[in-house]
Image (cartoon, helix red, strand yellow):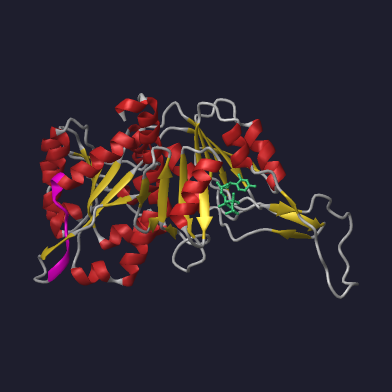
Amino acid sequence: MLGVAGGIAAYKAAELCRALVQRGYTVQVVMTKAATEFIQPLTFAALTGRKVVTSLFSSGNSEETLSSAVEHIAIAQEHDLLVVAPATADILAKFAHGLADDFLSTLYLAFTGPVVLAPAMNTNMWRHAATQANLEALRARGHKIVEPEDGFLACGMIGPGRLADPESIADVVAEQLEHRHDLAGETVLITAGPTQEPLDPVRFISNRSSGKMGYALAEAAAERGARVILISGPVHLPAPRGATVVPVKTAGEMRDAVFGNLRGATMVIKAAAVADFHLSTVPQQKIKKTAARLSLELDPTPDILAELGRDKKDWLLIGFAAETENLEREARRKLQTKNCDMIVANLVGGDESGFESDHNEIALALKTGEFLRFPRASKRELADEILTQALHLRHVLAEPAHER
Ligand code: CTP
């Protein structure tokens, strides 16, 4: 589906449309009312050989246009990807906030597949905090943003805002469609969030993990066609679409849930921040404030990842390492000692990335000996990167060692 919003760059959408048709895609064009002020639906109808959807409620049913109040559901279900070019400040705001007052914004809400957005607008509108906040929200949702280019704009200003080159937008569309089903047939077992280790009936020890990284991985894997089992410690996040969530509280419960759901898994990703110590015998009653000082003797929890490493079958094993220092050394050490195929390492403790943030800066230590660093990005973007690297790694590890 190619969404065309009402901006001066709408005419360039015709070039993108042609590029997509030339690459062999079936293209359904959806125009906002404002877009039809800039370019005629007939242009797109001629390029695609299909009727163009113009607006949700208008009944201007000519030969080239099509409109109905329920059609957005059918169209959303029939198509694999939505690309919007040009994406105006207005359509980005609608998408970010879930407004649905025309066909395109309604279609967006009804669509569950990958979304590519190619913004184009005046430089000041692009730089505005509201637009940037909307873009952040859309990125965090896993949508691909094809950044506008710097250049001379229709309004006479020079700066960022010009629609990206149609061929490069088509490249991003192709890349997204390639990912679309690349995890079909996989069963991905993911752990996420913190664990809570009770001290008495009302208190527990836990950590600052929000679960966002594990949930982003679950969402990305499900979108790419995998069957996803998400074993989650206590978090405040909605269940990712398409994943089966198994809620747990303690490290012991998480261990049992992992081994109970391991059958058929092809990838195991241990993003959870499991407590390392717990009280093995929890008092039945609340601890009273009687003594001046309280000492608690804690015992180690089961190291789930290490146990999986010892018992390793043909699933790909991916662990995490949250470090406050010596990132590479610690990641490599955990890769070895826990017998993993990959360790996703991240520095925690700063403000800008780590536990509670929507962003992170990670590096991957791979069984092949490589250590790859990635720039700061949203957890959802990193989730896709980790899954892509995991698929590639499995491919490499399957080759005979001398051919690597
Ligand atoms: N992990 C686990 N079970 C535990 C502790 C950790 O499965 N009881 C897993 C985590 O899910 C993560 C990896 O081990 O994938 C590394 O966790 P981390 O806390 O960084 O390392 P630790 O093994 O606890 O080592 P250390 O505390 O020395 O850094």
Q: Position of residue 152 (x, y in %)?
A: 8, 66
Q: Residue at x 56, y 57 (%)?
A: 210
Q: Nearer the viewer, residue 13 or 181?
A: 181
At 35% from the left and 41% from the top, the residue drawn is 72
Asked whether 276 falls inside the magenta stretch, the response is no
Instruction: Please indicate, yes or no, whether residue 209 appears anywhere in the rendered image.
Output: yes
Q: Considering only vertical position in the picture, is 214 above or below 47?
A: below
Q: Is residue 258 left or right of residue 399?
A: right
Q: Is residue 340 above or below residue 5?
A: above
Q: From the viewer's perspective, is 251 left or right of 288?
A: left
* In-front residue for pair 396/99: 396
Residue at (37, 60) in percent of width and height? 136
Residue 57 visible? The answer is no
Q: Residue 176 in the image: state x and y as whole percent.
A: 30, 40
Point out residue 367 in the picture as x, y percentages from the top left corner: 43, 38
Q: Which of the 4 image quarters holds residue 129? A: bottom left
Please state, as top left, top right, bottom left or bottom right, where the N terminus lies in the image: top left
Percent across and percent down for residue 384 are 39, 44
The residues colored magenta run: 158-167
